[in-house]
């Protein structure tokens, strides 16, 4: 699957550096088709956080819940079902996320 387009936002109120040399980045992910279930979407943030990614927060949108996998540097996307008793299920292959998850905001913290 093709990588999502990542647009980094600059926000002077947040600042680039946090305490203890941590860096905080914010941005927008633009997804396309989710081609292969189980492998996720490539999302390597090592250009922005070269030492270590400590936390990635991605907003859920349109009933989809993205989860960052720190070891593979990929985003797995789960679908929320209608009932509270149903567990999240991974998104099926060939699902187009272009509309449902357009301009999905994220925040990442690392060094």
Image (cartoon, rainbow, N blue to C red):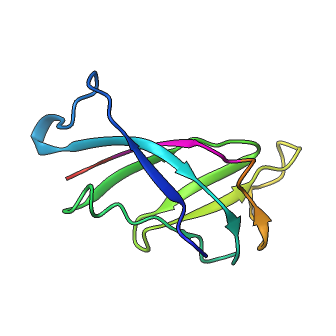
Q: Quadrant of residue 79?
A: bottom right
Q: Is residue 92 left or right of residue 73?
A: right
Q: How many marks?
A: 0
Front-most of residues 1 and 51: 1
Residue 19's place in the image compared with 40, above or below, is above
Residue at position x 18%, y 35% from top? 18
Rendered view: 89 above or below 100: below
Residue nearest the viewer, comparing 79 with 4: 4
Residue shown at the point (55%, 56%) measured from the top left: 67
56 left or right of 2? left
Left or right: where 11 falls relative to 97: left
Q: Nearer the viewer, residue 73 or 105?
A: 105
Residue 80 vertical position relative to residue 59 in the rendered view, above or below = below
Most foreground residue, 68 or 85: 68
Give the residue at x 62% y 57%: 31
Q: Is residue 102 magenta?
A: yes
Q: Residue 1 at x, y = what percent?
A: 61, 76
Q: Position of residue 48 (x, y in %)?
A: 27, 55
Q: Residue at x 74, y 47 (%)?
A: 100
Q: Residue 103 at what x, y percent from top left?
A: 59, 43
Magenta residues: mostly which secondary structure? Answer: strand
Q: Which residues are magenta?
A: 101-108
* Residue 53 figure quarter: bottom left
Q: Is 15 covered by the magenta stretch?
A: no
From the viewer's perspective, is 27 left or right of 41? left
């Amino acid at each position: 699957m093709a990588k999502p387009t990542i647009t980094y936002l600059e926000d002077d109120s947040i600042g680039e550096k946090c305490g203890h040399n941590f860096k905080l980045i914010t941005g927008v992910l633009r997804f396309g088709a989710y081609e292969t279930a189980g492998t996720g979407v490539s999302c390597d943030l090592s250009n922005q956080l070269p030492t270590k990614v400590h936390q990635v927060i991605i907003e859920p949108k349109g009933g989809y819940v993205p989860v960052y996998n720190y070891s593979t540097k990929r985003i797995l996307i789960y679908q929320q079902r209608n009932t509270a008793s149903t567990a999240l299920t991974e998104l099926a292959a060939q699902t187009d996320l272009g509309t449902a998850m357009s301009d999905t905001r994220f925040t990442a913290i690392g060094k």
